[in-house]
Image: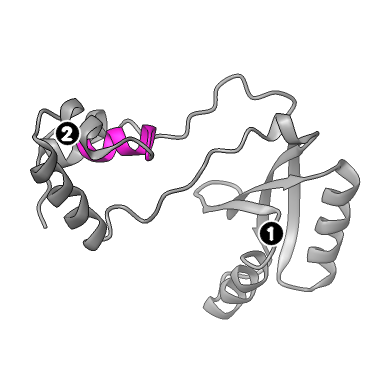
């Protein structure tokens, strides 16, 4: 499926508000409701829309600690990488994991209830012998800018 500018606009609007009606969405992208619905269904079927979710205001629920952790592995063989990824993907507190270039291998974003919980988690990971050579932790003090949507219309100028 080749996307056009209307498809990109639909995706852009839906990521901002996935609960809007098809009529509201159609108005925003200058289509009538039926063709808009057809496009959304096609975008879903083709995998461009992976699902819908709610953005939770964590501050309302209580105190949460966010930590970015740079992780370097001892070895970079496929088996070592697979063992690390298998372990890390099963940890609920891991909400992002990125393979990066530079002085370390992974940038992992953790959320925990406290520094103690994070420290215990990292100690368990090191003790699991999943290949972690070293790690550096960066505790988030404040997040003045947090966006939940990508600038699709700027990234994909169609």
From the top left corner, tell me how far across and down residue 127 is, in percent. 85, 69
Q: Residue tagged by mark 2?
A: 26
Image height of 110 relative to 139, above or below: below
From the top left corner, tell me how far across and down residue 152 is, in percent. 27, 35
The residue closer to the viewer here, 140 or 44, is 44
What secondary structure prevails in the magenta region? helix
Q: Nearer the viewer, mark 1 or mark 2?
A: 2
The residue closer to the viewer here, 56 or 2, is 56
Q: Which mark is on residue 117?
A: none
Q: Residue at x 42, y 49 (%)?
A: 52
Q: Residue at x 71, y 29 (%)?
A: 59
Residue range corresponding to the magenta coloring: 10-18
Q: Residue tagged by mark 1?
A: 92
The answer to whether 137 appears left or right of 77 in the picture is: right
Q: Secondary structure at mark 1?
A: loop
Q: Quadrant of residue 72?
A: bottom right
Image height of 122 relative to 140, above or below: below
Q: Residues within 10 Å of mark 2 (few under 14, many from 20)?
A: some
From the top left corner, tell me how far across and down residue 38 is, in percent. 13, 51
From the top left corner, tell me how far across and down residue 115 is, in percent. 87, 42
Residue 118 on the magenta span: no
Pick the quarter of the image with the C terminus: top left
The answer to whether 113 appears left or right of 116 in the picture is: left
Q: Quadrant of residue 155?
A: top left
- Give the residue furthest to the bottom: 79
The residue closer to the viewer here, 87 or 107, is 87
Q: Residue at x 70, y 23 (%)?
A: 142
The residue closer to the viewer here, 61 or 134, is 61
């Amino acid at each position: 499926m080749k996307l056009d500018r209307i498809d990109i606009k639909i995706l852009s609007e839906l990521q901002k508000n996935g609960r809007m009606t098809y009529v509201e969405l159609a108005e925003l992208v200058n289509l009538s409701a039926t063709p808009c619905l057809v496009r959304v269904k096609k975008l879903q079927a083709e995998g461009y829309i992976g699902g819908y979710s709610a953005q939770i205001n964590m501050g309302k629920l209580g105190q949460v600690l966010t930590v970015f952790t740079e992780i370097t592995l001892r070895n970079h063989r496929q088996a070592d990488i697979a063992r690390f990824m298998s372990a890390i993907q099963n940890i609920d507190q891991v909400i992002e994991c990125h393979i990066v270039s530079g002085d370390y291998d992974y940038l992992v974003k953790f959320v925990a209830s406290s520094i103690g919980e994070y420290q215990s988690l990292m100690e368990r990971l090191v003790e699991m012998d999943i290949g972690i050579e070293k790690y550096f932790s960066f505790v988030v003090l404040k997040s003045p800018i947090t966006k939940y949507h990508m600038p699709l219309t700027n990234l994909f100028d169609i």
